Image: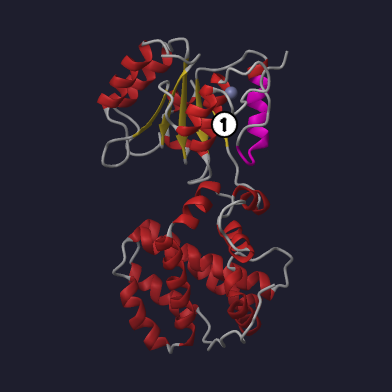
Amino acid sequence: VARYQAQWPLIGHELPIAQLTAALNAGRLRHAYLIAGIDQIGKTAFATAFAQTINCVSDSGRPCGQCRPCRLIAAGTHIDLTTLEGENEDGGYKIEQIRNLSQQLALRPGEARYKVVVLRNFDAGINTGPAMDAFLKTLEEPPPHILLLLTANNPNRILATIRSRVQTVNLRPLPAAQIRQALQGRDLSEEQLALVSQLAAGRVAWAINYIQDRDSQLWRVEQLALLERLLAMRPTARLSEIEQLQRRDDDELAALLSLWQSYWRDALLLACHAATPITNRDHRHALDQIARHAGPDGCLKVLLALRRTLQYLEERVNQRMTLDVLMLDMPALRLLAPPPGYQPT
Ligand SMILES: [Zn+2]
């Protein structure tokens, strides 16, 4: 009898869910999994749904979402569910954390069938040394009734000896329509819903965080305004403006360049009359003007300059020089404000 169903309380990720459901129904549960996928794609939510599935007490259709284990796990209050995060400064796991973990794992579950431990961002920090050796030992002699769920943005940063002992589950970005579905029932206008589901680029957790985070929303508005202001400036004025940019830390500068990249990708899409929907829908009026003025070649030139700048930033090449080149590669254009009542389509 198929006890487990492929309907998890999640949107998207149908393929990995179907594969895990089939394995569970065949009685092939492994003791450790690595849930891999880009930042904020929903790995922890996936781990939670997995924990519900294996601890659900319904006679059919697990996870049911209704029984006591399902509800407590969803609420994060089940005594047999532990979520850990590396406590080293670089985000890595401390040796004491792993020792505590093995002690905890030696005990039987309090009430559920399986004790589940979610080890978030297992690829963070230094991934060799005593903590990882201790963890390897835990993986080699797994106690029964244990499920370890590691999450990682970049599984290649995890020791190969660890990776070979866990089963990897790859999560892929969701289509914009599914992100939209995940945001249903929240207090958003149609326009906001359309914008956020495009901005999210397939990352559910990102979308949910973003709509609750005024600072991030404001930051985006300011950085796009800055970009549009720069277009209208003379080269010398641009160069003095980017003096300011350099005072930002590398992470923020990288985020800024990625945001601008998405903006210029939109301009390129419009310049090419592509059918692909643009990301920064709320800037459609300005983007249309840029696309007309710069054309596909002009947009592509800026996109390539942005990519090069991001790359240099990663390689820590002289920031100032690369930003200067970027400024000079941008076309000069005074943007007109949208007419009153303008509706982006
Ligand atoms: Zn249940």
- Disc 1 C-beta below 8 A from ligand 1: no
Q: Is residue 199 above or below residue 292?
A: above
The verdict on residue 32 being magenta is no
Q: How many labels does the image show?
A: 1
Q: Is residue 268 left or right of residue 214?
A: right
- Percent across and percent down for residue 73 are 48, 28
Under circle 1, the secondary element is strand
Determine which quarter of the picture holds residue 12. Answer: top right
- Magenta: main secondary structure equals helix
Looking at the image, which is closer to me, 200 or 167?
A: 200
Q: Give the range drawn in magenta.
A: 10-23
Quarter of the image with the C terminus is: bottom right
For image coordinates 58% across by 54% down, the residue present is: 201
- Percent across and percent down for residue 312 are 40, 62
Q: Is residue 40 above or below residue 270?
A: above
Residue 167 makes an appearance in the image: no
Q: Is residue 343 left or right of residue 230?
A: right
For image coordinates 43% across by 12% down, the residue present is: 142
Coloring basis for residues:
secondary structure
The verdict on residue 22 being magenta is yes
Say what amino acid the circle numbered 1 marks. Val
Q: Which residue is tagged 1?
A: 169
